[in-house]
Amino acid sequence: MEMTQDIAPAADPRIAEVFAIARDTLRRRWLTLALVALAVMVAGAAFVLTLPPKYAATTRVRIDPSRNPLATRSADGRAELTTEAIETEVSAIRALPVALEVVQKLSLDNDPEFASALKDAGVAARTSTAARQTAVANAVLGHLDVSREKLTYLIDVKFTSSSGQKSAAIADAFASTYIERRLNGKASTAERQSEWFSRRLAELAVETREADQRVAEFRGANGITESSAANSASGTVLDQQVAPLASSLSLAESDAAGARAALNAAQAQMQRGGIGSVAAVLSSEVVTQLRAQRALVMQNMAEVQARYGDRHPETLRVREQLAGIDAQIQAEARRVVSSLQANAASAGARADSLQSSLSNIEAQRARDARNSVLAESLEREAAAKRAQYDRMSQLSLDSMQAARVSLAPAEIVDNAEPPAGPTSPNRPLLLVLTLIVALAAGTVTIAVQEALSGGLTSVEDIEREYGLPVVAAVPKVGKTENPADLMLDEPTSFYAEALRIGRAAVMGVRAGSAPQVVALTSALPAEGKTTTALAFARTLAIAGSKTILVECDVRRAVMQNMARSPRPKAGIVEVLHGDAALDEAIMTGDVPNLDVLLQPTRFFSSENLFGEHAMDALMRDLRGRYEHIVLDLPPLLGLADGRFLAILADATIVVVKWNDTSRGAVSSAINFLRTDGSRPVGIMLSMVDPASASAGALNYYSNKYSDYYQNYRS
């Protein structure tokens, strides 16, 4: 009968289970944890206690750009107080040139604390003074710590040494050397700037004069003058002629237009009514007078003609006089018209002349405008030269003042004081940290051991992975005790109860459905299979079932050393070979209702001992005699005998050593049984830690059950 169960999906372990697993691991491997932690703690404590004391002294330096003579404005000072600028000063204090000066001032190259750095510096450091001091300076910098105090303008210069006096002296030396270098650097820079400014000022003076001269020459050559009016732009002579000429041109064009209009009107009137109808002619005084004379002559002619007739000499004279007056009127009219024509031509010629002059002036003005732009450009260049000269003069003055003033842009606020006691190492803290590291090392060690063990510990994992139930978790007993004998000596012990639980799981609570032949096997040797088989057979016999234990692991033949029975003379090998009868080989066991068929000596042979019909016949005989038959099979991996025997059993139990047998071995053994057609019904864990929670629901050994498992000897 094969006992199976549904494989449930894996669930996330609860926190309590995780703590239980950790507790079990700690209980099983506490000695490893203790040894590793103790070793690490001893080594760490020895290291901490041998650390030499260190003394740290701090000098405080304040960065103050307002002391810089070149920072003439507050904005200049604020510009030098940026975070980047202060961090730059921090790096400047840690510069190698500063360290070299400190080494030279304090002769640190002869100090044993730092001279040890020469051992790793090579031959050059031992033969060259400069190389020696450089090596020592680098070693000194390794003891220096320079940092800014939060967001203030204070810089802490801290030096750590084996001597309090020395640490304070070196910290002060670094601060003072830095300030001296900054002061000397500022003065030297100011002197170089002053010299450069002087040369540049001389050059700018020449350039400014040349620029002003070019402006004056250009204005004179192109007739560009400055207007005397306030806020007016510059102009030329032509600019001053444009306005009058434009006004004259306007009047001339107006006169020409009037003359042309009068002439056009006269010509139109002449075409309609003759020259006498011209308005200018009619308005002429001469013509008016002539017309008046003609009127008188006409009157006189009428009287003469009426008196003397048409041919009278007086009439003819008067007619000649009238013709003369008409001729004069015509001549005067023609003169008036000619005068209009002359006036129109004269006015047009004058307007054209003025227009030509104005056009010439405009063309000249366009050229002058371009020249004015060039003049303004030259003027701006000259103004820029003058402004540059003025700015350079101010900078030169500031530089000369800086060269004469000995103020550094930093100052020492607090000098270093020798510390009253060592600042490091903090031995109590280091010892606590060492203890933490030691415990962590031990924990990691046992965690790695657990990870590398590859054994099976969790009932849930076993049942989920192999699809077989765990029928019992047999506890591990003391090294001085025989586990199988606990069934006899302590029948109410945890060990005995575990076998009874296994019997109930395999046989069931109703005897009618129980398998008759139960085989116990394992994947590998030394998993407690033989001991468990003996204890299981005793459990069946104690429960009142007539049982026989058959030792089939003939290559080991160790059952006779475990059972409390007489030493057998013949075993299963002799029975199968026909060298002994079955009744001769079967012996009475050490508990009522129990018989045993043991192998007296180890047997090695290449024959198929259990695969022939003799074993089938033996099993049929035993089935007729006993209620239950317990077979102790050889391991399945590496041996074939166990696989031939397992198919003869009604149920096969695979014994697995808790937290030892690899998953792959168990998987292979179960696959063999299933492939061969055997009936594996469950897994029995052997040598389980009694206090382990890894056995899941089978972990029945706890404080709650302490009253149920009182050991006593019967």
Image: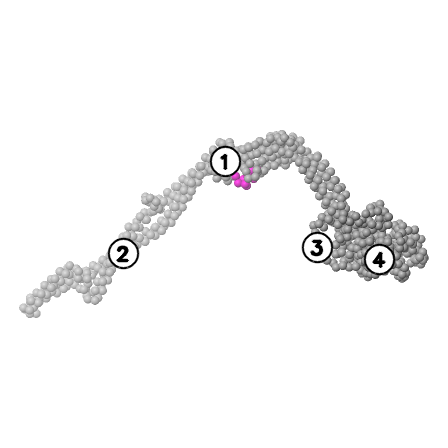
Q: Label 1 belongs to which residue?
A: 66
Q: Could you tell which of marks 3 and 4 lies nearer the N-terminus?
A: 3
Q: Is residue 532 left or right of residue 103?
A: right
Q: Could you tell which of marks 2 and 1 lies nearer the N-terminus?
A: 1
Q: Could you tell which of marks 1 and 4 lies nearer the N-terminus?
A: 1
Whole-angstrom CA distance, mark 1 to mark 3, is 71 Å
What residue appears at the point 43 percent right and 38 percent down from the top-left corner?
A: 390
Neighbour class for label 3 at 10 Å: few (<14), some, many (≥20)?
A: few
From the viewer's perspective, is the residue at label 1 or at label 4 nearer?
4
From the viewer's perspective, is the residue at label 3 or at label 2 nearer?
3
Q: Label 2 belongs to which residue?
A: 253
Q: Label 3 belongs to which residue?
A: 11
The extreme left residue here reads 307
Asked if the residue under mark 4 is in contact with the one under mark 1, i.e. CB atoms within 8 Å, the reply is no
- Which image quadrant: the N terminus? bottom right
Q: Which three-letter amino acid code belongs to the residue tagged 3?
A: Ala
From the viewer's perspective, is the residue at label 1 or at label 3 nearer?
3
Whole-angstrom CA distance, mark 2 to mark 1, is 76 Å
Magenta range is 81-90
The extreme front residue here reads 707
Percent across and percent down for residue 515 are: 84, 59
Percent across and percent down for residue 642 are: 85, 57
- Can you tell which mark lies on residue 518? 4
**Element under disc 2:** helix
